[in-house]
Image: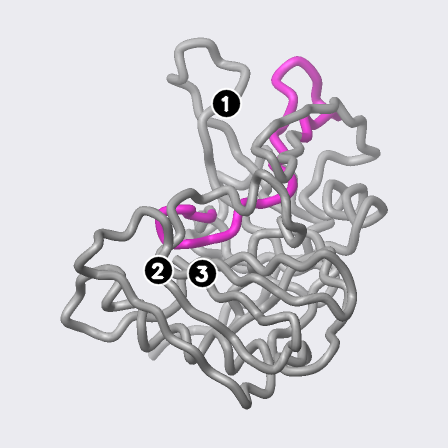
Amino acid sequence: MSTLTMPLPAGTVTFEILDQLQEHAPISWGGLTAPTGELHSPLRGDAWPDYSVFPDRTSTDQVVVLRRWADGGRGSDVVRLDRRTIGDALNHLQVAGPVCRFAIGHDIDPFDGDGSRDLPVLSVWTGPVVDAVDVPASKPGPDLRGRVRFRDRLSDRTNVLDEHPGLVAWEKLVLEQTASLEEWVLRSGPRVADDLQVHEHASELGTLDDVLTWAEQWLHTAYDSPYPMAVSSFVVSSRGAGQPMTVRVW
């Protein structure tokens, strides 16, 4: 018989006591809940967080906030909190952009020279977020400047066409919406082997959810897998509201 573990309010959880909590203990904040000890994994297709928050080793009331930019660059700030809790850190980041997801785990101290020390870390993803089912695929759509959610998976936030289409290289499929907005063209990514190339067309796709679902049936070909595969990572790009979209899928 299992017992139900009630989530701990993030405002009561300090960085210092994280190691003392039961494994996978849930922590809640602002209607969101995350288990401890489950850090994001880019290898599983998780989108990179916007912020990584570490306790400052030189002070008891400060945290170091690492920010990741769309081009892969990083910046850091030292922030003083009234209380060094998970909740206070999330409240601070909520001001810069709506927090849509967080994760709590351990990572290598980014300021430790030999990489031998790990610290508690709070990973934070911010929005705005639009669900793929709410993005039309055959008529003018919204201005995509945040993240897209597909089956509870968040896209990377690089939703503009530039030299850095995503933080994970070598997409397996590229889907481009034609200028008329009524048709989509699916082709293999630039590094897919010649014998695994695909090139398909589709119309009458109602939403971006339909587009990503359609793309899934070709993923196993691009990966040379005998089994069906699901979208694990994706980026949606557009030059603005009502403009054709490009979707890159891994």
- Mark 1 or 3, nearer chain start: 1
Span of residues in magenta: 40-65
- Mark 2 or 3, nearer chain start: 3
Please state the horizontal and vertical placement of residue 12, each as a whole percent of the image. 70, 48
Look at discs 1 and 3 and give the one toward the viewer.
Answer: 3
| For the residues bearing labels 1 and 3, Cβ distance under 8 angstroms | no
- Mark 2 or 1, nearer chain start: 1
Q: Pointer 2: what residue?
A: 188
Q: State yes or no: residue 249 in magenta.
A: no
Q: Pointer 3: what residue?
A: 174
Label 3 SS: strand
The amino acid type, in three-letter code, at marker 1 is Asp
Please state the horizontal and vertical placement of residue 168, each as a whole percent of the image. 45, 44
Q: Pointer 1: what residue?
A: 109
Please state the horizontal and vertical placement of residue 232, each as a whole percent of the image. 40, 61
Quarter of the image with the C terminus is: bottom left
Residue extending furthest top?
Answer: 113
| For the residues bearing labels 2 and 3, Cβ distance under 8 angstroms | yes
Q: Nearer the viewer, residue 88 or 198?
A: 198
CA gap between label 2 and label 1 equals 38 Å
The residue under the point 28% across, 52% down is 192
